Amino acid sequence: MMIFSCFLAAILLHEAAHWFMAALLGVKLKFVLFFGLSLEAHYNCHGLKESVVALAGPLANLLLASFFTFCLPSSSAFVYEANLLVALVNLLPILPLDGGRILRGIFSKYISWLKLTKILSSIGEFVACIIACTAIYWAKNGAFWWLVFAAYIFYLSYKEKAKAPYVLIQALILGNNRGFGERYFRLPSRTNLREAIYYMSPGWHNTVRVNGKNIEGRILISNWLRY
């Protein structure tokens, strides 16, 4: 019971840190209940905002674990272990975990958001399969719960990849191409507007260069919607 309480408290702290940072940055969150409590950002959490909000949760767990290690070493080992485990699992570089969101927020300036989402989600599906195979081979009594966890990660990664095009279009249509910085990319002159949109990354101000001329991202989107 003590272990369960520590893990629940670590998860609640994790999600509270996400919520607090999101509130500071003006990002809307919604609760998602599926195999546990989690928060999901609305359309306006992309670019460096996504990285900062995603980092807040694991950072809070690591700070609490460090506090118990250095200030209260004999108080409760369960609190330290629970917070450390929650932080490390969420920092895995896969989507939709925090580690994947941190990487996507940073590198979406250099790689298209849609392509990066597909790469990190595919890695998540692969990691889920590795966890399942390892659980079947190594675990005995606890194999079932590891398989449930692997299936959960696979489902979330698949869902993240499947909805990515719709999330991208929604974010761009709603004007979320204003971010912390500007993002430039080049396209061939014969690229149509629909293809150009999929090269964009929400959370950054997208500027497309075609034959040496700059075309603002919002102009491309408005043209596509008009025609």
Image: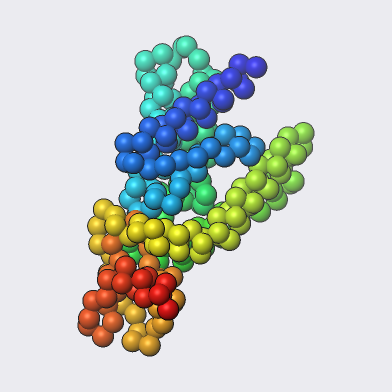
Q: Report the front residue among 206 and 106.
A: 206
Residue 130 point in image, percent of width and height: 64, 52
| Residue at x 28%, y 82% (from the top left corner) | 210
Quadrant of the image containing the N terminus: top right
As drawn, 196 above or below 68: below
Residue 95 point in image, percent of width and height: 51, 52
Quadrant of the image containing the C terminus: bottom left
| Residue at x 32%, y 36% (from the top left corner) | 24
Kindly indicate the quadrant of the structure image that contains residue 138. top right
| Residue at x 32%, y 68% (from the top left corner) | 218
Say whether residue 211 is left or right of residue 155.
left
Q: Residue furthest front?
A: 226
Q: Report the front residue among 31 and 133.
A: 31
Q: Residue furthest top?
A: 75
Residue 102 point in image, percent of width and height: 40, 49
| Residue at x 41%, y 24% (from the top left corner) | 64
As drawn, 123 above or below 1: below
Q: Report the front residue among 156 and 126.
A: 156
As drawn, 158 above or below 15: below
Q: Say whether residue 139 is visible.
A: no
* Colour convention: rainbow
Residue 110 point in image, percent of width and height: 33, 64
As drawn, 150 above or below 176: above
Q: Residue furthest bottom?
A: 190
Q: Say whether residue 167 is visible.
A: yes
Q: How many marks?
A: 0
